[in-house]
Amino acid sequence: MELVNSIVKAVRILDLLKSSGPLSYIEILKQIPLPKSTLFKILFTLENEELVRRDIDSGRYQLGVRLIEWGSGARAQLEIRKVALPFMQNLSEDLKCTIHLAVVSNGEVLPIESFESGSTSWPHHIFHGGVGIPAPLHATAAGKAILAFMSRDEIRRTLNNPGLQKFTEATITDFDQLDAALAEIRRLGYAVSNSEHFEMVRGVAAPIRDHDNKVFASLSALGLVSRVSPEMIPEIASQVIKVADEISRLFGYSAESA
């Protein structure tokens, strides 16, 4: 597959600033020979996106604050994956379900780790979700478990752009109905997706919190509706909540302080 040259050049500039520290336009040009107009456009774009910062007095470029945010986010995701995976494996074996660990990214829920069910009744070929594949917040248990603990304004900002798209007959497509569902999730402590994204899949999810009691991820159990009956949901939810709380405690969450 062909690489995007402008992105490759931008990454090389960022790598140079990381290794060499603040540099002027001329100093960057000497080490990364590019047409002057090309280098100027790339630096202008990186500065506009806060990936680099130009000091007004010296005119030198250095790495920007947005990279710090990205680095913190990537580090947090790597940490939670490492912490959560053993718990996910045990939970999957107990429930005979596929277990997902997910975060919010660009207005969608993004699975960042998964432990696949060993059950022979789980036909993976029909299920298209997985690590790195975003899914709608409002139509998944994993997404709703995080949405429920956002402020009302944050929920509207997050969902207004894509809207409440319909995926199945069970998908919630009305904001008032969604508000009521999220209130119920806060009351119960877990979220359920009853064939709302994929018709054949039922999901149960619980929020994962940090030391500030902020929900930053969710843990979900997924199974076929033919195997995971509505009557099984409370027991599955109880186990998912228990494991999500154990993971949360490792990130400093305390139910007493909350």
Image: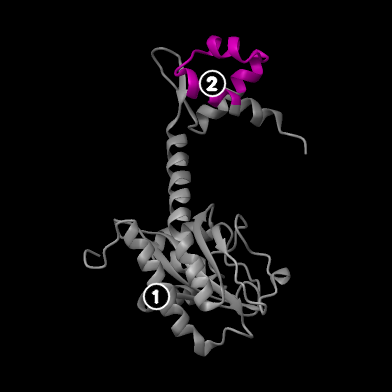
Q: Residue 182 placed where, x, y %?
A: 43, 73
Disc 1 element: helix
Along the horizontal axis of the image, is 94 left or right of 255? Answer: right
- The secondary structure that dominates the magenta segment is helix
User: In x, y percent, where is residue 205?
Assistant: 47, 71
In which quadrant is the N terminus drawn?
Answer: top right
The numbered mark at residue 16 is 2
Residue at figure coordinates x 49%, y 21% from the top left: 19
Q: Is residue 175 visible?
A: no
Q: Is residue 208 magenta?
A: no
In the image, residue 16 sits, relative to residue 145, either above or below, namely above
Question: What residue is drawn where x is 45% and y is 68%?
Answer: 145
Q: Which residue is mark 1?
A: 183
**Which of the two labelled residues, at mark 1 and mark 2, occupies the earlier sequence position?**
2
Q: Amino acid at mark 2?
A: Leu
Indicate the quadrant containing the C terminus: top left, top right, bottom left or bottom right.
bottom left
| Dot 1 alpha-carbon crowd within 10 angstroms: few under 14, some 14 to 19, many 20 or more | some
**From the viewer's perspective, is 245 left or right of 51?**
left
Quadrant in which residue 132 is drawn? bottom right
Across and down, in percent, residue 13 comes to: 57, 23
Residue at 64% x, 25% y: name it: 9
Categorize mark 2 by other alpha carbons within 10 Å: few (<14), some (14-19), many (20+).
some
Residue drawn at point x = 45 percent, y = 19 percent: 21
Looking at the image, residue 248 sits to the left or right of residue 124; the answer is left
**Is residue 46 visible to the viewer in this orientation of the structure?**
yes
Nearer to us of marks 1 and 2 is: 2
What's the magenta region? 12-41
The picture places residue 207, in percent across and down from the top left corner, at 41, 66
- Front residue (pair 120, 183): 120
> What's the amino acid at mark 1?
Ala
Compared to residue 199, the image places residue 61 above or below, namely: above
Label 2's element? Answer: helix
